[in-house]
Amino acid sequence: MKLSRRHFLAGGAACAAIPVATLVTAEEEKTGKNLALVFDQTKCIGCEACSQACREANNVPAQVSRLNIVREGPYGEGNDKHYRFDRQSCVHCETAPCIAVCPTGACFRDEDGVVDVTANRCVGCQYCIAACPYRVRYVDPETKAVDKCDLCRKTRLKEGKLPACVEACPTQAVVFGDLNDPKSDVAKLLRAKQTYRDKVSLGTKPKLYKVPHGKGKVI
């Protein structure tokens, strides 16, 4: 069928008259969460309650760990002697190298911004372990699949609870929330405190923010 110039222009005008809102897909209209953590080094006392709670909540085998608290120091002398505690766990990159290199799609980001691994799709190639600049992934000795912190996505989050590390911390050194919600605890803290993130120069956009210790040095 031959389409005349007059009919073509008429059709184009009809499309232009369609309200913009009707051209937006349901997926584009959906506003998911953007979950993140803030670790306050000024409050951490190195008790490792967070690590133990993580292990229990997620059945992490004894040989490996999703979350480690690293002690540095001592700094200073006499009454000023002190240690600096840092958290090592998945930072849930917005631009995640692990997802980019995974050949099977086992590594993925969910609708709330949590980077996770589908164990039964993992073939154990360990490309993601090599690609992760934060060195926080491991091979589960029981499932033989790669694993790491998933913010308790498959355990506590699905039940509407906070991640185990957040709830277990006796000094409230770990804060969790939605970056997209200006009223969330994590968003409020980021507005109130000076923070930093590890290895931002790599362009990974990590979502583990840290309040610097104030003593010693920030790496």
Image: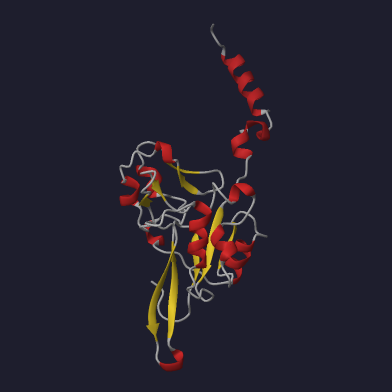
79 or 216: nearer the eye?
A: 79
Q: How many marks?
A: 0
On screen, 124 above or below 167?
Answer: above
Scheme of image coloration? secondary structure
On the question of residue 151 being in view, the answer is no
Residue at image point 56% right, 68% down:
169
Residue at image point 52% right, 43% down:
110
On the rendered structure, is 113 left or right of 7? left
Residue at image point 63% right, 63% down:
185
On screen, 67 above or below 28?
Answer: below
33 or 106: nearer the eye?
A: 106
Q: Point out residue 196 in the picture as x, y percentages from the top left corner.
A: 47, 68
Outermost residue, top direction?
Answer: 1
Q: Point out residue 4 in the picture as x, y percentages from the top left corner.
A: 57, 12
Q: Point out residue 74 in the picture as x, y percentages from the top left corner.
A: 38, 83
Quarter of the rendering occupied by the C terminus: bottom left
Quadrant of res 175: bottom right
Q: Point out residue 22 in the picture as x, y percentages from the top left corner.
A: 67, 31
54 or 7: nearer the eye?
A: 54
On screen, 104 above or below 77?
Answer: above
50 or 13: nearer the eye?
A: 50
Quarter of the rendering occupied by the N terminus: top right
On the rendered structure, is 22 left or right of 57? right
On the question of residue 3 being in view, the answer is yes
On screen, 86 above or below 29?
Answer: below
